[in-house]
Image: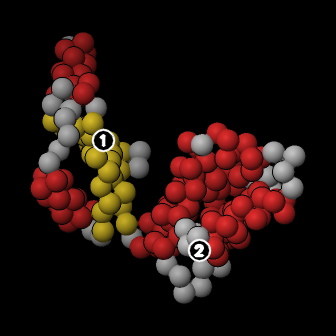
Amino acid sequence: MSGLGSRYAKALISILGDMSPDDILPQLEACRDALSENVDLRRAFESPAITPQEKDGMLSALGRDGKLDEIVVRFLSLLVRQRRLKNLPEMVDAFREIRDERLDVSRVTVRSARPLNPDLLQKIKARLAKVFGGDVEVEADVSPDLLGGIQIQLGSTVFDGSVAGTLGALSRAIVKG
């Protein structure tokens, strides 16, 4: 978690009051995604030719449409004024990490060679919740290079039960002799 992203995320969480981070996180992720996917939108917010008042007006319109809570509009407005909107992705990541810590949530990535069916993913989630003790959010990822089996990643730790991982371990053992 970067220093800048962490500072802004902590500040945002500290002013939420009775609001849940779960209410704000999807809105922040949607804004991050919109800015990364829409080059014209990003350029508009970064352009010095568009006044800060016009930028605030654009953000306020999103709030009036009910797409964003007022606190998110104010946060984005602050980022625009301080020319920190380009740092929104790291702020969203830091916000999610802080949220996960507070709610004792483990974020796990499950990689497989082919898409896993929802029932199997639910069983994996339940088992991981028992192992890690707490709530687990599972993100499924398809990596055909695994050949078969699965990899489970929690933070920087990877539990490799894939065919590719097993073959790699066997290869290293043979080379060592």
Q: Which residue is mark 1?
A: 141
Q: Is residue 101 left or right of residue 134?
A: right
Look at the numbered disc 2 and give the secondary structure of its residue.
loop
**Amino acid at dot 1:** Asp
Q: Is residue 108 above or below residue 22?
A: above
Look at the numbered disc 1 and give the secondary structure of its residue.
strand
Q: Can residue 1 be seen in this snapshot?
A: no
For residue 84, the mark is none
**Amino acid at dot 2:** Asp
Judging depth in this view, the residue of 21 and 32 nearest the camera is 32
Q: Is residue 1 left or right of residue 167?
A: right
Q: Which residue: 37% across, 66% down? A: 105
Q: Can residue 116 be seen in this snapshot?
A: yes
Q: Is residue 69 left or right of residue 168?
A: right
Circle 1 packing at 10 Å, graded few (<14), some (14-19), many (20+), is: some
Which of disc 1 and disc 2 is earlier in sequence? 2
For residue 69, the mark is 2
Which image quarter: residue 138?
Answer: bottom left
Q: CA distance from mark 2 to mark 1?
A: 31 Å
Q: Is residue 7 above or below residue 12?
A: above
Q: Which residue: 26% across, 24% down? A: 145
